[in-house]
Amino acid sequence: MIRKLFMILLMLLLTPGEARKSFLSFLNIGKTETLFFTKTEETIIVESSYKGKRANSSYLFVQTEDPKILQVLNVTKTLSGITKFAINLMTDQEGETNLTIQLWDPEGRQERLVEEIRNVKVKVSKQTKDSLFPAPVHVDRRILMLILSMILLNKCAFGCKIELQVLQMVWKRPLPVLLGAVTQFFLMPFCGFLLSQILALPKAQAFGFVMTCTCPGGGGGYIFALLLEGDVTLSILMTCTSTLLALMMMPINSYIYSRILGLSAIFHIPVNRIVSTLLFIVIPVSVGIIIRHRIPEKANLLERIIRPLSFVLMFTGMYLTFRMGSTFLKLANLEALLLGLSVPALGLLFGYSFAKVCVLPLPVCKTVAIESGMLNSFLALAIIQLSFSQSVADLASVAPFLVSVCSICEILLILLVHKAKNCL
């Protein structure tokens, strides 16, 4: 649930300057390009490797198939001596159209067509009041602060359940932590890449699923570890460890799979947000541990509110997620939905199976499964929003949103089956 609220904070923290312009290259001729526009005015950067004698005199010709949907305002050369252009476009109405972009070189009295990009598909979708990005502006900050305070209190209460002796024992037997790390940072990204290729997803959307699959365990996994009778101490420890490893593994995986997918974007790994996530987990939990050993009667009181408070936070997060996800749902298709359902299910299956093969206790098996399947999707959302143009970022952001929603639905289904089994 925590990552749902972080999605709100992320959108509050992102500035307009962090959303970069769409980028096209003549090197990608023959590959299908799809751009998504949501604003009245958009800019595309087009770059060529052409270095002819009169490269400085070269110019760009841009034609739209349907001027009612998209109009070309102007084309300007951005850097002297390099064939790099900025195309300013204006959107009039929603719909789909195609762009044709040609690079011409004037040779004496004649003109020569150097390169051409045909059928660049442009989808125009005007933002609405309930779309994801303006939504945080309408969230009452007092309500947001109340929810964040409840989260901190809930984490502190979980800290009251942790015994230092148990924590030391977990460190001495690190196999569950290692299983979770291998699943999260090696197996899951490869599965995300493989399935995205089998389903033939657009490369931006495929990268979104890969980045979501390489995320660390979600901050709310400990809630389900408690509700499913797992090991809460191990869950918190695995979350902290995987978040630390993400500082190294997420940039590595993003570099490897971006090259495989043919993406040449420059990635901005939000290290400060990863560190803040770690602190957001460690500090209140540490306060809870101190309370348990210094004021045990207060610790007992806090332990009583864990379950009701966890349910309130869980359903609040689900409500906020669905409210803010309308933009992403518009861009989702059947293939993306299938992959969104598959990613958390595979994580749960791999984590539980590996722990079972290693003959670990049942509570530990459940915890490894939860940490492997409940991914901290807001980190993938942050990387995507900081690494791509806004139009491509919207398409790629479908992945973390779908995985987030599907993981919650699947873990709730498992919880219902578990409770029904206990009742019977």
Image (cartoon, rainbow, N blue to C red):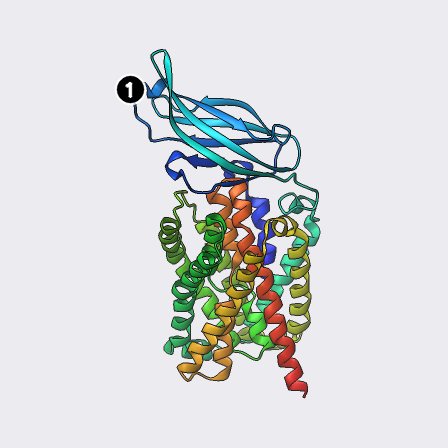
Front position in the image: 156 or 415: 415
Q: Residue at x 49, y 73 (%)?
A: 349
Front position in the image: 149 or 315: 315
Image coordinates of residue 5 in percent, x first then y, are: 61, 56
As drawn, which residue projects farthest toward the left? 53
Image coordinates of residue 334 in percent, x first then y, are: 58, 57
Residue 170 visible in image = yes
Q: Quadrant of the C terminus?
A: bottom right
Q: Quadrant of residue 180?
A: bottom left
Image coordinates of residue 239 in percent, x first then y, are: 48, 66
Does residue 169 lie above or below 197 as drawn? Answer: below
Q: Secondary structure at mark 1?
A: loop
As drawn, which residue projects farthest toward the top? 109
Q: Amino acid at mark 1?
A: Lys
Front position in the image: 354 or 308: 354
Front position in the image: 291 or 108: 108
Tally of numbered discs? 1
Q: Which residue is mark 1?
A: 53
Residue 291 visible in image = no
Image coordinates of residue 340 in percent, x first then y, are: 55, 61
Q: Residue at x 69, y 66 (%)?
A: 312
Q: Quadrant of the N terminus?
A: bottom right
Q: Residue at x 62, y 75 (%)?
A: 415
Q: Quadrant of residue 159?
A: bottom right
Does residue 14 lie above or below 146 as drawn? Answer: above
- In the displayed structure, does residue 80 sit left or right of residue 401? left
